[in-house]
Every structure is written in structure tokens, then in C-alpha cells.
Amino acid sequence: MPRTYEVRTYGCQMNVHDSERLTGLLEDAGYVAAPSDEQADVVVLNTCAVRENADNKLYGNLGHLAPVKAKRPGMQIAVGGCLAQKDRGEITRKAPWVDVVFGTHNIGSLPVLLERARVQEEAQVEILESLEVFPSTLPTKRESAYAAWVSISVGCNNTCTFCIVPSLRGKEKDRRPGDVLAEVRALVAEGVSEVTLLGQNVNTYGVEFGDRLAFGKLLRACGEIEGLERVRFTSPHPAAFTDDVITAMAETPNVMHQLHMPLQSGSDKVLKDMRRSYRQERYLGIIERVRAAMPDAAITTDIIVGFPGETEEDFEQTMHVVREARFQGAFTFQYSKRPGTPAAELEEQVPRDVVQHRYERLVALVNEIAWQENRKLEGSVVELMVAEGEGRKDEQTHRLSGRARDNRLVHFTPVDASGAPVDVRPGDMVEVEVTYGAPHHLVSDAPVRSVRRTRSGDAWEARTLAPAAAGAGSAVSLGLPAMGVPAPLPDAPSCR
């Protein structure tokens, strides 16, 4: 019998995409996804290192797995991702029952390391300091049949004092535009109709081959791919964000009017301490130009509360930017000290109770504004790509969920004007009227206005009905972030 696997993912979209590579590698090596109700023979933890509780989460999970492994001869545990890159041999010292530790630069080594650990009956720790093979050249098992991540670069050249990612992911490495576009075309041929271009800092794309306008050109080139209906990207950096990208977004029909623009702080002093090479005026100027070119643009952000030395006046500057920018949503974080970052050595650490109070005030303001903005859409008609598994209460409410062009989550009632059920599949397109705007989503309890069956829906149906795909949903356990109020110290961080 083939050995079974499960991949558990923590952290940002980069990790989610890496997990798709890991599942592809494992299946290429003959492993099969474990059914959701069965314990896998191989458990892979793809870790995050940005949040303060990342270590506790990892070792807590490993502790739960230890007795399971003790009862299952031959079971293997592998740890990869950013925390593995950081802690290296420390993981097998603290959790000697771990079989494999691999880093961010050598995910392609996982099957070989698992086999070597099995044959030699000892832990294998392999951490490379630089990228050997661009991850996109590795086999991939994509979680979705209709939407896909496409990595355009890895690594980061910024030196933000709070961020450990550059030391774990390395300097920026860019893919050639032709390679990116070839992957997108191949995905479209398989039925994908939405792609999200990924990079730690997408708008510095082209730095390696000397074209500072490369990202805007790439967006326009995606607009020429027949069958590609939606293009998104994450995340840009305000310091490098240029007007040619705004123009490309506005003029390319399949590039969505959605922008995730990390703020981190509204205080010029704090931004300087963070080594964020922009200031409040520049940031708000970008938002103003985006809205002038695309009045319907939905803008989201990342904000850190309680950075060392942050005063009440500094925090009020952040609140001011939130009021001016009127974000559709925000990932809000309490600053957490990360060993190995310059900010961890700063003396003026803000008391935890002060940070908590500011955090609660910020979340309340973000939610208030997001709710006001969503209420403005009541009565409007929006086009949705029907999604799979996005509505946690869909079964109870008898609704389905989908994403609008601006990426807002919409829960809709799948009936026509006569009250009869409509036949829609994930990947299909529907038009619905928004009847209620909540802080973090929209609701449509009106009849579905139109349904457009798509190649993406066909691809989802083929995958779902294919015997080989049975249990595919258990292959990767995703820890995707959600807008609005995150759980305390969430593990879905900003890496920008």
C-alpha cells in the first residue's frame, strides 16, 4: 500500500503556495493524500516564524504527534518552512521524534530526506543558505481547480527592523517574465480562471534583470491571456509603488481593482524606526491616486500596534491614516519581539496592557469603517466567482459563497426568481444583488440574477468526480488569514 501524507500549513500565502509544491513532490514520489478521518503515515508541518507564538505552536503540535507516532511504527514527521530555517538543529534537540527538518530553500529535498531518514533510522536536518531551484519548477498539487498562486519572486531586499523574513527567505530572486507567463497560460489551459501573483514585494519585480517597470508590464501581459478572467497580486511595498502600476491596473480589464497595501504604522517616527522607507504623506498619496484611477478599488492593509517607542501620539497618527484611507479591511497585529531582528534589541518596549488597549481601539475603528463601506454596496449588483469552503456557516444558512471582483466575500442564496435552486459549481460566475453589508462580508438573499458556467467550473467538477481525487481536500490543511479581527496573536502574519 502506498504511504499516506498530510501537510499542515501555517502563515502567509508564500507558505500556502510552498505547501502546494510539497504535496506535488510527495505525490510525484508515490505518496497519496490521507483520508480526512485517518492518521497519515507522513505529517509535514510547514511553519511560520514571524509571530511570537510560532515556536509554541510548533512544539505544541509536535508534542501532540509524539504519542501518535509512538503507536504507529514507520510514521514520519517532517518540519519545514521559516521556523525550520531559523531553528535548524534545535528542533530535533527539543523534539527528537522528528525525522526531517528542511528549510525554505530546499523544499524539493523532502522526499529524499524522508527516504534517507527511514533507511538510516536517524533524523535528517538539511538547511541551505540560498535557493537552489526556483520553487515553481517543482511538481505541484494545487488546492483549487479554478484559482492559483503564481510566484513571480522569492526573498526580499528590504531591512524592516521588525521582520525576520529576509534572513529566512534570502535576497529577492526574480523569475523571467516569459517563465511566469508560461505558467499562467498552462494554468488557464487546465481550467484556472483566476491567478494571484505572489512576491514578498511584487512591485520591485525586475530588480534582477534591470527593469523597474517590469511589474506593470507583467500585469498588462496577463491581460492578453485569453481565458484568464481575474488577476490579483500580493503584496506591494509603498516605497516602491509607482504610478505605472496604477495605470496598468486601471487599463487592464482582467486585473482586479483590489490592492493590499501594507501600512504598518501611520507615524513618520515609527516608520523611520521600522526602516520603512516611506512616510504618511507618500502612503496617503498612493491611496488617493489609486482611488482617482479606480474609484471602486477595495484597499486592505497590514498594521502593527505597539512597536517599540510608539507613543500615544504615534498611535493616533495610525488612526488618522485609517480614517483617511477608509480601508475595506486590515490585518491588525500586536507587535511581538522576534529574536534576530533589530527591533527586538530596542529598549522602549511598550507595556502589554497599553498595546492591548490600542489594538482594541484600532480594531474597532477598522471594523466601523469597513462596515460603513460595505453598507454602501447594498442594492448594487456584483459578479462573484463561486468559491469552495469560504463560508463556514453556509451549510446552516443554506447559502453559497463567492468572491467579488474586488475580493469581498459574499454569501448568497442559490435560488432563481421562482425560488428554484440554481445549479452552480465552484469556479462558475454568478451575478447577485447585495442585500446586506456586514463588517467582514456581504450578503445576498435576493434571487441570483444570472449564472455563467465556466471552464473553471468544469475543471472543479472533473476533479471532484475523478476517483483519483477522492480525499484530495485532506492533502493540505491551510491556515489562511482572514480580514477583520484576528485571533489573539494570529499565525497569519504580514511578511511585507
Image: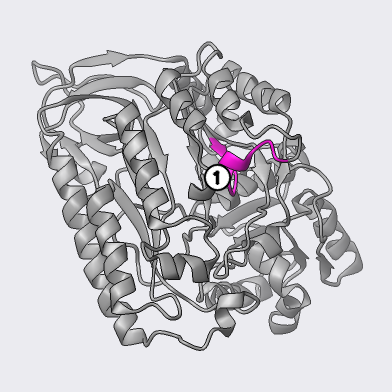
The x, y position of residue 148, in whole percent, is: 54, 33
Q: Percent from the top left, x then y, of residue 183? A: 66, 26
On the image, the x and y values in percent for residue 429 come to 33, 20
Figure disc tally: 1
- Tell me if residue 349 comes above or below residue 232 in the rendering: below
Residue at the extreme front? 281
Callout 1, which amino acid?
Ala
On screen, residue 377 versus residue 347, left or right, reads left
Check the image and report above or below for 116 versus 192.
below
Q: Position of residue 165 (x, y in %)?
A: 63, 62
Residue at 60% over, 26% down: 218
User: On the image, numbered disc 1 is attached to which residue?
Assistant: 240
* Magenta residue span: 197-207
Q: In this orientation, which residue lies closer to the viewer: 273 or 11? A: 273
Q: How are the residues colored?
A: one colour
Q: Is residue 354 visible?
A: yes
